[in-house]
Amino acid sequence: PSASQIYTVIASLNSCSTSAVVSLSVIMSPTLEPSASAYTICSGASVHLYVNGANSYNWFPATGHHSTTGQNIIATPLSPTTFTVRGFNGICTGSATVFIKTISNPDMKIDAPYSQVCAGGFVPLKVSGAQKYNWYPVGGLSSATGPTVNASPAITTNYTIVGVNSDGTVSCAELVSYQVIVLPYAKAIVGSNKSVCTGDNVYLSVSGGNSYRWWPATGLSKTEGALVLAKPSVSTVYFVESSYNGICSATNSIVVMVHPKPVVYAGRDTVYNLDESMSIRATGTGALKWISGENVFCGDCPETQISPKMNSCYIVEAINEFGCKNQDEVCISITDDFYEYLPNSFTPNSDGLNDLFLVVGAGLTNVKMDIYDRWGEHLFSSKDQSTGWDGTYKGVDCKAGVYTYRISYKGLSGKNFEKAGTVSLIR
């Protein structure tokens, strides 16, 4: 029966019959009426589910960490879900369903070939994972909407992209951001050209960026860095690229002029005796100057007298019109050799041959000579090596015979010597 009823039962036997009355009560199953706070939501969002028509309720399936019992629950479905609610009125149960549609949340990803851009340049930005896109701020962008834009900000800018998935009036959004770093163009500041002499080196410097590359490599100590050492063998133009981490570069060049060094020759090493006149002579190109050595009479003269007292070396320096210098050295060895000779006779007859008795020798100084007769009388004295005895005493010729001499002198070494002997005067 669909409702409460009274049933009569009649029983008969032959011609006799009897009856009874049965009353049947029918209790109806609860009629449930579920509803929701929203029927379309973003995936993972919360929705309130309501129901009435029974005394107690159970909801299926369970989502999130909320209660599954009660007239009012909170559900967080991740995908479209049909929720079933069972109601119990103490005797009978009933069920009903409610469908919640979910919209996928945007899953945003940004793709860009680089994050740094030179001033005035642009970087293409591409975003995916949503149906619609809005870009903020709009300054420097080719478009404020759409999945692909070109960003050309004047300064470093952090762009925010709002991605939206929609169904009807319901929209689900996600935010992502991407920073575009704006770098100024580098400068390549190298200064003036350089000049060096053959075989010399010079430092080259550059500024205006944070990364530098030099070429050609010939003659360079290294090809990267703000400071390099150049030692080219010939005049060379060096180029340098200045950049910020390899981008926004600028190029400049600097010339290193290589000038020849002058030719200079100080002369061959020489041996001089201490009593000789000594000189040194340099040849070469450019201005010559003696810069080292003992007792140089004219330092600016290529050829000059010298008076060393011991073995000495002399250095001459040549400077050409480019300021390039070169040096050479000559060494002088000094000897103190000397000699003396005294004849054993002389003939003062005015024939121009052996007319004087004198000290013959070289390398002698402080020469003194005295002459005596056989009785010890002093006849002659001289303090000049070139002044000898002519065989007279007080203007009168001395007789032929044997006379005594005594001489003293100083050698080149500075040592004093004395000698005595006899000489024959022959007439």
Image (spheres, grey):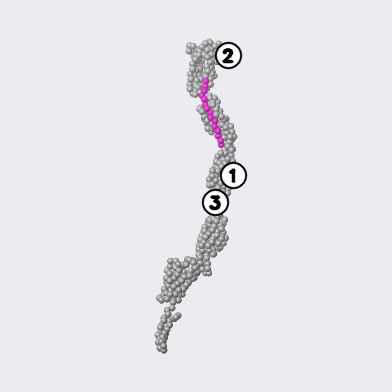
Q: Between marks 1 and 3, how big is the CA–CA gap?
A: 22 Å
Q: Tell me the magenta residue range.
A: 325-339
Amino acid type at circle 3 is Gly
Disc 1 versus disc 2: nearer the observer: 1
Q: Circle 2 sits on which residue? A: 350
Percent coordinates x, y for residue 182 in the rendering: 54, 55
How many numbered circles does the render carry?
3
Amino acid type at circle 1 is Val
Disc 1 versus disc 3: nearer the observer: 3
From this view, report whether residue 312 is shown above or below residue 23. Answer: above
Disc 3 versus disc 2: nearer the observer: 3
Q: Quadrant of the C terminus?
A: top right
| Tag shown at residue 257 | none
Percent coordinates x, y for residue 69 in the rendering: 42, 70
Is tag 1's residue or tag 3's residue first in the polypeptide sequence?
1
Q: Circle 3 sits on which residue? A: 246
Q: Circle 1 sits on which residue? A: 237
Q: Is residue 326 left or right of residue 35?
A: right
Q: Between marks 3 and 2, how big is the CA–CA gap?
A: 104 Å
Q: Camera-side residue: 370 or 219?
A: 219
Percent coordinates x, y for residue 346 in the rendering: 54, 14
Q: Residue at x 54, y 54 (%)?
A: 183
Circle 3: is it few (<14), some (14-19), or many (20+) Cα within 10 Å? some
Quadrant of the image occupied by residue 192: top right
Q: Secondary structure at mark 1?
A: strand
